[in-house]
Amino acid sequence: MDAHQKTLRGLVALVLTFVATTASAAPARIISVIPAVTEMLFAMGAGPQMVGVGSYDHFPAEADRLPKVGALLDPDFEKILSLHPDLVIVYGTQTDFIARLQRASIPIFRYEHAGLADITSTIRRLGDAVGRTKNAEALASGIERDLDAIRARVKDLPKVSTLLVFGREPGSLRGIYASGGVGFLHDLLDVAGGTDAFGDVKKQSVVISSEQVLARAPAAIIELYDQNTSTDKLAAEQAVWKQLPSVPAVRNNQLHLLRGDFLTVPGPRIAQAARMMADALHPVKKDALHPK
């Protein structure tokens, strides 16, 4: 064999080794205890690589059939070990859990939800980590196009001062959890053509009183509920706001109680949440938001 053939054979062997190494680098046994990230993984086609999910990870249906390994506050470390993961998705604040995984030499992917733009950047970063780069790019780009379309449809309409509520004591106006001036819920409201009534409070969430609602006098109130909330329950909770008749949103019947398991999940269905909010705030644009 001459020198040229030896060199050529060496290069071929090097390429084959690189391809094999790259192919084997993608994790094959992934665990996620974060609903948003679990949805991202399935949406980019990484479902077959999943071996465990969190206790509150119910979407898509395939995720609900996987072994449950606890949740953010109570991950079942022994159960996780028993599934032999080669990648575990963790929340950035799970410091003790992260330390235990690192001591066990289990690779991790750190996640924390923040603004709307972080959803698609996380999808891209996650796709790179699990060997689904192309699918992740297509998914992220599709979400960005959908959000841009909603922005374009409402951009010439007046912004609506909106109180965005995602929790309170049932049957009362105590312990109201509302969106503050940062985070994906705040950003969703902006995309949908609203202005956050507590946008000056630079927190992802604020706990407010009915007196503060009176003082802010929002023109609309959007309240988010789980998909399984009954129609009777929604009607009863909507009636609670009638305790504040001087608030413009109440006086003008601009109370929008939205129902959907995706509304508070910063994942692949986020454009659907933005569209629902836009429909509530700007019903005259409903046909434009859903072109035939």
Image (tube, rainbow, N blue to C red):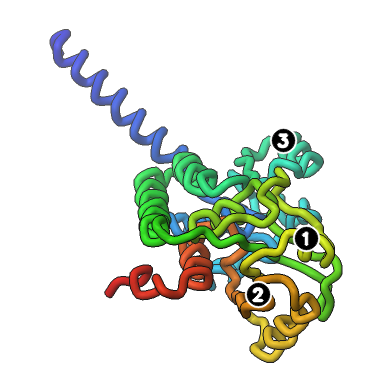
Q: Is residue 22 above or below residue 156?
A: above
Viewer-side residue, 201 vs 24: 201
Residue sitting at 30 percent across and 31 percent down?
A: 16
> What distance separates the C-alpha of mark 3 from that of mark 1?
49 Å
- In this view, which residue lies farthest toward the front? 246
Q: Residues within 10 Å of mark 1 (few under 14, many from 20)?
A: few
Labelled pair 3, 1 in contact (Cβ < 8 Å): no
In this rendering, the count of numbered labels is: 3
Front label number (1 vs 2): 1
Front label number (3 vs 1): 1
Identify the amino acid type marked 3.
Answer: Gln
Residue sitting at 62 percent across and 78 percent down?
A: 252
Chain-order first, disc 1 or disc 2: 1
Q: Is residue 180 above or below residue 172?
A: above
The residue tagged 2 is 226
Q: Position of residue 170 (x, y in %)?
A: 81, 77
The residue tagged 3 is 102
Q: State which quarter of the image contains the N terminus.
A: top left
Front label number (2 vs 3): 2
Q: Which mark is residue 215?
A: 1
Horizontal relation, residue 137 to residue 194: left or right: left
Residue sitting at 68 percent across and 76 percent down?
A: 250
